Amino acid sequence: MSNSSRRRSEVVVVTGAGAGLGRAIVQSFAKRGARIGLVARGRERLEDAKREVESCGGQAMVLPGDVADPATTEEAAARTEAAFGPIDVWVNDAMTTVFSPFHEMSADDFKRVTEVTYLGFVYGTMAALRRMRPRDHGTVVQVGSALAYRSIPLQSAYCGAKHAIVGFTDSIRSELIHAGSHVHLTVVQMPALNTPQFSWCKSTMRRKAQPVPPIFQPEVGAEAVYWAAHQRHREVFVGWPAARAIWGQRFLPGVLDHLAAHQAWDGQLYDGARDPSAPVDLYQPVAGHQGAHGDFDSRAQSSSWELQVTMHASWLATAMYGAVGMVVRALRAGHTAAATSPNGRVMAEGQRGQPVSAQQ
């Protein structure tokens, strides 16, 4: 089977598939003909996503449920495999957040963000690995964020969850390496994206919430997820803002603490007062047919040259490694052929008439 045929028939599960980045990720796999299990709380949006998949030539199954409940991801995995076959790629994307200073948050709200945005990934990874490990095949993609390294004010629960995702993924990856497994885990660290979450997230702030500029369209992140699902990179940074925040945290964390205290606080808020009567998705899905994009199309970038550089550099490196490997194998084969006598015994250099054993 060719590589293109394999990809056209691959089986994928995406959590948070109904809207925002998850919806864009579904579209990215769908246009390659994937069969996709769609996991989210809102059935309306999942039905919309299913129609989009089918219009692209793929197949989809609607799997409503809350990823904070481990039964949701386990059932999603079982039903997807019963319908489409073994899962090749599992994408953990479901999230929620609260915009609020920590001292104004309730314990229940903090717990809820953690259960969805962190434990939802844990439960999804459990369901995926329960099936992938025995087969020694599959990839789990964790949708991360630059906030997994560089936390900002007003989103303490979300930042904590994203930090936790990196920690538990690194631990599991080491376990898979110890076992000699070919199952792959990767984390794709996202920049600010134009998704609907900013219009329905819970907030205690007076002004409306926004992603910290510069803002990218969700399709940029979705293409990065698709690419990462078919590579062997442990981590992918999407866009220069994400890379800058991550590397800045490694070298100048104290400086970034002060910058975040001022710039990231105001950077998450924009013109106009928040509508206190607007629906909030923290505990229940917001009704309607929201898609991948939020309210920031006029300010969002539809491409990332940094991601393109990363992708092309990876392809070039892979090609170079492949070419070098072919040359090395050819040289070894030629050396072996030249140094081996007809009776299979290696002739020591300088002692052509005196055969010695090939085993040293």
Image: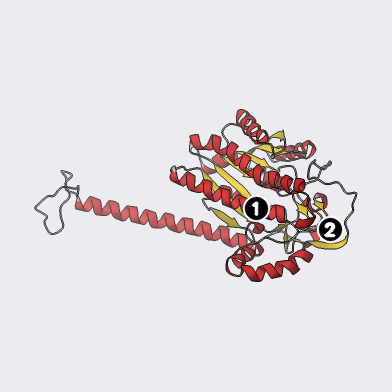
Residue furthest left in the image:
353
Say left or right for 297 vs 355: right
Q: Is residue 9 visible?
A: no
Residue at 60 percent of width and 47 percent of height:
141
Label 2: few (<14), some or many (≥20) within 10 Å? some
Image quarter of residue 215: bottom right
Query: Percent position (x, y) of residue 251?
Result: 58, 69
Determine which residue is flagged by label 2: 205
Label 1: few (<14), some or many (≥20) within 10 Å? many
- In the rendered structure, which amino acid carries the disc numbered 2? Met
Query: Percent position (x, y) of residue 68?
Result: 69, 40
- In the rendered structure, which amino acid carries the disc numbered 1? Lys
Label 1 sits on a secondary structure element that is helix
Query: Percent position (x, y) of residue 339?
Result: 20, 53
Q: CA distance from mark 2 to mark 1?
A: 22 Å
Residue at 13 percent of width and 59 percent of height:
350
Front residue (pair 301, 78):
78
Q: Looking at the picture, does residue 118 appear above or below residue 318?
A: above
Q: Earlier in the sequence, mark 2 or mark 1?
A: 1
Q: Is residue 15 visible?
A: yes
